Amino acid sequence: MGDSIKQQVQWFPGHMAKTRRLIKEALNLVDGVVVLLDARVPYSSQNPELDDIIKNKPKIVLLNKCDVANPNATSLWLKYFRNQGAYALAVDCKSGKGLNRFDEIVMEALAKTIEKNNQKNMAGKPLRLMVVGIPNTGKSSFINRMGKNSKAKVEDKAGVTRQNQWFVVGNGIELLDTPGVLWPKFDDPEVGDKLAFIGSVKDEVTDKETIACRLLETLSKTNPQAIEQRYKIDSVDGLQGWEILEMIGKKRGFLIKGGEIDYERASVIVMDEFRGGKLGRISLELP
């Protein structure tokens, strides 16, 4: 699966080098960086080189999709990132949950920049942040939601190239969409699996049944009650993924001609229900 994922998203060395270069150039235009991560897999949804690229710029981590992640796990991750020197916030960019605190976190993270601006008689100078995140962590949802009251993108400013898109989001804050596309740490097969579970890898390039079986096997060890309660199964202890999928198919009556179980339909349902939070608020990683 790892190979097919790599092939589909086409992370090749030239692409990575270009994105790295563009981000480094854009860093000169911003005061800090906003990093979008998926709250269910904060480790797997990171870019492995980002800290090295952004160096000492203040970093605000947004744990997105917190509404489908385990709240206790999210609290541990918030503490973890704060201990690493980042500013962190649990949010849901689609509903807007948690984003009312974004401005406050920005003021906190950029306190030194604001102080310097005041000393230089530049009070009120826009605070500029670059927004980064690997595909499907919610970067566009965040920018769209924050910029929805903005009448226009800010463009044609001195020192800002046309390909850099700026958005005014109020309170003197401007957001820059990332130039180039960030990549996850795909050399770790476990990371590839987790990104497939949450839908960060297009389902067309992965075998739905294999992914559903791997997810069920993972959950049978970490959250067995989630499967048992949702699908009215007595126990999944010690079962393999395909055995659990078969039981779900039977329970839901997903049958094809001859009474065979429709594994593909069962797989699609399992993945959709997991991603939609119907199996409960589940996190797949702890710090």
Image (spheres, helix red, strand yellow):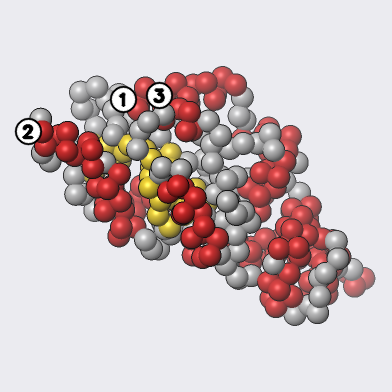
* Residue 102, x across and y down, in percent: 31, 53
Question: Observer-nearest residue: 201 or 192?
Answer: 192
Question: Observer-nearest residue: 163 or 32?
Answer: 32
Looking at the rendered structure, the secondary structure element under dot 3 is helix
Q: CA distance from mark 2 to mark 1?
A: 21 Å
- Left or right of 52 on screen, residue 259: right
Name the kind of residue labelled 2 in the image: Asn
- Left or right of 13 on screen, residue 242: right
Question: Observer-nearest residue: 143 or 34?
Answer: 34
Q: Quadrant of residue 267?
A: bottom right
Nearer the camera: disc 2 or disc 1: 2
Q: Residue at x 60, y 21 (%)?
A: 13
Which residue is label 1 attached to? 28
Nearer the camera: disc 2 or disc 3: 2
* Residue 286, x across and y down, in percent: 60, 54
Q: Quadrant of residue 99?
A: bottom left
Residue 47 seen in the figure: yes
Name the kind of residue labelled 3 in the image: Lys
* Image: 166 above or below 141: above
Q: How many marks?
A: 3
* Residue 97, x across and y down, in percent: 38, 63
Q: Residue at x 35, y 28 (%)?
A: 27
Q: Which numbered dot is residue 121?
A: 2
- Left or right of 147 on screen, residue 72: right
Q: Earlier in the sequence, mark 2 or mark 3?
A: 3
Q: CA distance from mark 2 to mark 3?
A: 28 Å
Crowding near the residue tagged with mark 3, few <14, some 14–19, many ≥20 C-alpha atoms within 10 Å: some
Q: Earlier in the sequence, mark 2 or mark 1?
A: 1
Which residue is label 3 attached to? 24
Name the kind of residue labelled 1 in the image: Asn
Q: Are marks 1 and 3 in contact (CB under 8 Å)?
A: no
Q: Residue at x 85, y 61 (%)?
A: 240
